Image (cartoon, grey):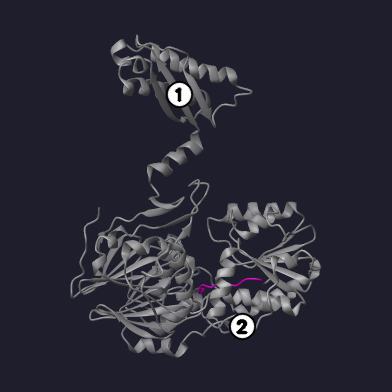
Amino acid sequence: MSKPVVPKKDELLFLPLGGTGEIGMNLNLYGHNGKWLMVDLGISFADGGKFPGIDVIMPDPEFIEKQRDNLVGLVLTHAHEDHIGAVPHLWADLRCPIFCTPFTKSMVYSKLVEAGLEDQAEITVIPVAGKFSAGPFDIELVSMTHSIPEPASLLIRTSCGTVFHSGDWKFDPEPLVGPHYDKKRLQSLADEDILAMVSDSTNVMNSSESGSEASVRNGLVDVISKCTGRVAVTCFASNVARVESVMKAAEICGRRVVLLGRSMHRIYSAARDNGYLQNVAPLLSEEEFSYIPPREVVVLCTGSQGEPRSALSRLSTDGFKNVYLEEEDTIIFSSRIIPGNETSIYKLQNNLSELGVRIITDKDEHVHVSGHPGKEEVKKLYEWVQPQISIPVHGEARHLRAHAKLAGECGVKTQFVAKNGDLIRLAPGKPTRVSEVPCGLLAIESRRLVPLKSPIIVARQKMMYNGSAVVTLVIDEAFKLAVTPQLTIQGVIDLEDEFENFEDVVDAVRDGVRLLKKADMKRDEVVREVAIRAVRRHCNKRYGKKPVTDVHIIRLNDFFE
């Protein structure tokens, strides 16, 4: 258990607990004058091959849970899952006010409703470019552009200095949905003596600018107009501008749109509630899809990252009653591959290829632009903000290093490359790593949260790689084996083709237990250990596997006493 850290009145602290050294799971804390301010609380998708049965992971907020009375608020920069997805899972342990823009509020509120927390959580809606206070922190939202409506950078003012926290952003000259970035306000920051800039590093290694959503809309029209069969488009549901682009492109090409995927419907409703997606054609229902000519439909669905339970994954295996894809139809991946998702995406694309579906990605046509800034945009932001300190976040180690190097080239005096758990004093004096706070990960396991290093998950990993075995031993009143040991073994031996080897394992257990003295046969822990060792040693020698082994001991004298 980490010890509480109470920020001093004359110091400003920064503590990333998620999203630094990785992409996703953003959780950042600022400490000043006895209080803490949290910025974002997100999730990431787990590597199913590494963590079987786990889909979603998130930062462990134990550090701040222990002093939640000092937590003055949670500010959400925008409504992407890696920034808000953990709120319904962790808010009950934090119990702090939430501050966000109207669209983000809609997205968070729907999650709180599902968690049964909508009447407990206090959400304060802050208009884009609005200002508010939380404890000793004065916060101003600065309008930015990103692949979702109403993203905001934060100006966090304290008596020790001002931090510019960028959130996720880009400079989109034609964002199509939502406000433009506030160029005038950003340019004025050079006159405000910004102490530090904590900023997005995702695309800092890309030399080109991220590009405009308007160009993608034109690209989608060009691609869809050439298709003769059904068209499906998959993208991040939260990219409302992309959703609108697909709908507009479909309309221009004489097609109607059907939405597939729970999150796609949720985003559509939230966008409509906040004044977006007003001038689009009515949606097509799933039932109507089945009798509309193929050249007149577009399926807009989730699943661009190969998520196994997504709408596109179900579509690739004929998982819908009325919506389907066939040979000569087209699927457009209007998205990028998030690092780590390659295997699941390629598996999905192979499934689609087996159906005869034509696949188009951003490598084939202009159907996607990033929501994160390229190198030239990052340089422009440094030119406007002119901070004394640069702290790169939202990126893997290579991104953070490249970002720090670029900040130095832009004239920033101090660059600080941190990792999750680094407690950094920004002021007074030179930025210093004060200590390292224990930080971990939590996983959604069925309907509960468990540490990612939980024995539950560790055992499952071991079983996945090494198989499992269960031995049943029946011991009589004379403390001898009453019958041959019973063995069930999974994932190690093919019982049809290798039954002799199976019997060898049984013999190894029997021989090991028979060698025990009577005094040891009376002790369950000794008998159990001998049986486990016999199974694992034999399987390791023959197969190179040490199955997770459990032993059930039945003593007949228990039944006759």
Q: Which residues are magenta?
A: 367-374
Q: Position of residue 530 (x, y in %)?
A: 37, 20
Q: Is residue 43 above or below residue 238?
A: above
Residue 557, picture quadrant: top left
Q: Position of residue 278 (x, y in %)?
A: 61, 83
Q: Regarding mark 2 in the picture, which secondary structure is present there?
A: loop
Depth order, front residue of 522/63: 522
Mark 2 Cα shell of 10 Å, populated few (<14), some (14-19), many (≥20): few
Q: Give the farthest residue toward the top.
A: 478
Q: Is residue 373 magenta?
A: yes
Residue at (44, 90) in percent of width and height = 184
Q: Main secondary structure of the magenta part?
A: loop
Residue 332, picture quadrant: bottom right
Mark 1 Cα shell of 10 Å, populated few (<14), some (14-19), many (≥20): many
Q: Which residue is mark 2?
A: 278
Depth order, front residue of 254/476: 476
Q: Which mark is residue 471?
A: 1
